[in-house]
Image (cartoon, rainbow, N blue to C red):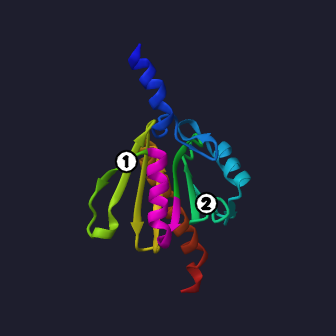
């Protein structure tokens, strides 16, 4: 009986143990329609919708003040969620890390090539959450992913890129 009482007292104090959500949508069973609509309703602005990829790009500065972009990736076959990635301003790296620790608890840490590119990782409800500085974009990447779906997305993205290259070459065939 005492154990149950302690559990009920401890539960509100511990980090979130339930489903991982973005914009109120459970990522484990999210799809393109539900998550995309929720992102737009929260204030994210869709960028470049004329050439759809296996992911959608959003201006996320109105949704998460520290962020620049949000990428939402979906399986093209079933429109199921595969990944979400925020690009966070480098100047806000520590502040965002503190928010993540508060929400998800202490992360597993993996040393990077340099001291400053340490990877922080959480695992919750089948969703892998990672946070790391990305010097190519001068930002930090906050990534939520369903690992099994990410490999499918990579294959689909490679096919889309190959098809686009063929189309672009065909358009310019007579120019050179």
Instruction: Classify the position of the N terminus by image quarter.
Output: top left
Question: From the viewer's perspective, is 59 left or right of 140?
Answer: right
How packed mark 1 is, by other alpha carbons closer than 10 Å (few <14, some 14-19, many 20 or more), is some
Q: What residue does disc 1 label? A: 106
Residue 87 is one of the magenta-drawn residues: yes
Q: Position of residue 9 (x, y in %)?
A: 47, 28
Q: Quadrant of residue 40?
A: bottom right
Label 1 sits on a secondary structure element that is loop
Q: How many numbered dots are placed on residues in this image?
A: 2
Q: In the image, is residue 100 above or below residue 137?
A: above
Question: From the viewer's perspective, is 21 left or right of 37?
Answer: left
Disc 1/disc 2 C-alpha distance (Å): 21 Å
Q: Main secondary structure of the magenta part?
A: helix
Label 2 sits on a secondary structure element that is loop
Residue under the point 57% across and 72% down: 168
Q: Are marks 1 and 2 in contact (CB under 8 Å)?
A: no
| Mark 1 vs mark 2: in front | 1
Question: From the viewer's perspective, is 152 left or right of 110?
Answer: right
Magenta span of residues: 86-104
Residue under the point 41% across and 53% down: 130
Extreme residue in the right direction: 41
Q: Position of residue 100 (x, y in %)?
A: 47, 52
Q: In the image, is residue 20 above or below residue 84?
A: above
Q: What residue does disc 2 label? A: 64
């Amino acid at each position: 009986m005492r154990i149950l009482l302690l559990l009920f007292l401890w539960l509100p104090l511990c980090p979130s143990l339930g489903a991982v959500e973005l914009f109120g949508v459970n990522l484990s069973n999210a799809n393109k329609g539900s998550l995309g609509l929720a992102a737009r309703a929260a204030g994210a602005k869709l960028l470049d919708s004329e050439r759809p990829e296996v992911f959608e790009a959003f201006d996320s500065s109105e949704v998460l003040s520290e962020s620049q972009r949000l990428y939402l990736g979906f399986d093209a076959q079933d429109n199921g969620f595969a990944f979400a990635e925020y690009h966070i301003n480098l100047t806000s790296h520590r502040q965002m890390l503190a928010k993540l620790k508060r929400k998800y608890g202490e992360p597993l840490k993996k040393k990077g090539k340099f001291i400053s590119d340490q990877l922080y990782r959480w695992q919750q409800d089948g969703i892998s959450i990672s946070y790391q500085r990305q010097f190519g974009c001068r930002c930090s990447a906050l990534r939520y992913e369903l690992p099994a779906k990410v490999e499918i997305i990579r294959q689909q993205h490679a096919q889309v890129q190959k098809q686009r290259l063929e189309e672009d070459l065909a358009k310019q065939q007579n120019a050179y």
